[in-house]
Amino acid sequence: MAFYLETTPSNLPVLDPSEEILLVQDQVGLYFGDEKSFRHNNGTLYLTKKHIFYVDSVDPKKNSLKIKISDIRDVQHTSRYFRSSPKIRLSLRHVEKSWACKICTFINVGDPINPCRNCGVANRFTIIKPKSDARFSQGLCTACTFQNYPDLNTCEICGNQLKNVDRNQLIQLSFRGSGSSKFYEAIKSETDEIEKQRYSNKYDTKVLRKAILEKSLRMGGIHDLEQSHEMQLAKNGRTLVHAFQDLDAFFSLAKDTMSLADQFAEKMDGLTGTQQSDKVQQLLNKSNQLGVLRGNHLDNVPVSANSRLYDIELCKSISEVLRTRLKADTDTVTMTQAWAIYNRSRKANLIPPTRFVKACELIDSMEVGITTSKMNSGLILFQLKTSNHSGKLLSAILEVMNPSTTALKCAMRLHWSIGVTLERLYQAEMDGYIVRDVYEESGSSLLYWKNEFDELSEELTKWFDES
């Protein structure tokens, strides 16, 4: 059955720690049974190895759903017929919320494919029931009590329906655009993997026996540690050799190379003082500057010159990365800094500036938790989307003045760059909240003060009126 889906502020599905998005398709509607769901008329599908996520385009917080791959019993594909869109029919099995272990009778919660949480034994044992009772309950008609063949759907005598198909156990995915065949093949592949796992859980006695035998024959002690260390060194050497053969091979093995760099950084953290040479210290600093973008699903989205789906998903991915950098309401990031931060997190398959700017133009029209602002000089800034954001920035600037400040002090206090600070101070000065004065001692530094001339002029006006 379908469950409620929790989404991120960027309208992306919340994934499990070991889950990655494999395929993305937009312009998809849902049918429950044969009835069209008007609340789920248009959305985006995300496929992983565990779930099918539906994120609604109109109201993603309320109308988003997810379907477990393990709950799918059968998958069928119907092509386009006249005005009918191509559909994928998902027949869902009835999964009990709890099941009792046949070994320790512990009540487990979740899918029966998982092993018992108490004893760890897989649920591959079945209780044999009398064959006559099972067949008698399957084909019995509730209207005329005639015993039908178990595989029939209607009674042979009175025509009554024998099998009641639940509306929630049949979900159809209607593809208004393209991509139905590719999505069907991907779902079919994942369901086949689940079925293989179910089969292996039932008939894995020989595999377990072989694993126990290999573990018992394995040598231990110092020899085992030396052998594993040599195997790890050989694996690392092969990874580096293959990675630097050419640029394409380096991109294909980027993940292995970065994991090797992380292992190198962990080992180097244990060295202190003179044990680190200058070159090793430089390599360590470079490895610490690398970021990791988890769940990078853009590689599975089709790219074209006018692909709006790719721009939308790129906009969501950018907002996910920037929200980890923007902590406070006053934090800001320029367009150039955002482009560098995002490409550093991708590591490979970098995004060109033109595509990045095109995706950032969609941020204000999408509810992703981030907004943009354009300064008088044309500088574009990113900040968290909050209420009365300009008022909070002005309050932060006025709090720094005690009673005056310079651009450098303001930048250090608010963690802004000098360029952003000068833009903010100039905007506040144009709005009449602060004033500037040339510092007499140095002659070159500018001091910014709170504008108290308006209050003084109002008091003088009242004094002249009273006199």
Image (cartoon, rainbow, N blue to C red):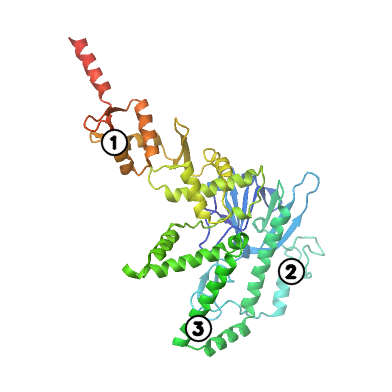
Observer-nearest residue: 55 or 363? 363
Q: Earlier in the sequence, mark 3 or mark 2?
A: 2
The 10 Å Cα crowd at callout 1, few under 14, some 14 to 19, many 20 or more, is some
Residue occupying the point 66% across, 68% down: 193
Mark 2, residues whose alpha carbon is within 10 Å: few (<14), some, or many (≥20)?
A: some
Give yes or no for contact between labels 3 and 1 (Cβ–Cβ under 8 Å): no
In the rendered image, the vertical position of residue 319 relative to residue 435, given as above or below: below
**Residue 361: quadrant of the picture:** top right
The residues tagged by marks 3 and 2 sit, at their Cα atoms, a distance apart of: 65 Å
Residue bearing mark 2: 140
- Quarter of the N terminus within the rendering: bottom right
Other-residue count near label 3 (Cα within 10 Å), few / some / many at <14 / 14–19 / ≥20: few
**Which one is earlier in the sequence, the residue at label 1 or at label 2?**
2
Q: Residue at label 3?
A: 227
Residue 350 visible to the viewer: yes
In this picture, is 200 found above or below 446? Answer: below
**Residue closer to the observer: 118 or 455:** 455
Which secondary structure lies at badge 2? loop
Q: Is residue 100 visible?
A: no
- Location of residue 141 in the rendering, given as x and y in whole percent from the top left corner: 75, 66
Tell me whether circle 3 and circle 2 mark residues in contact (CB < 8 Å): no
| Amino acid carrying mark 2 in the image | Leu
Q: Which residue is mark 1?
A: 406
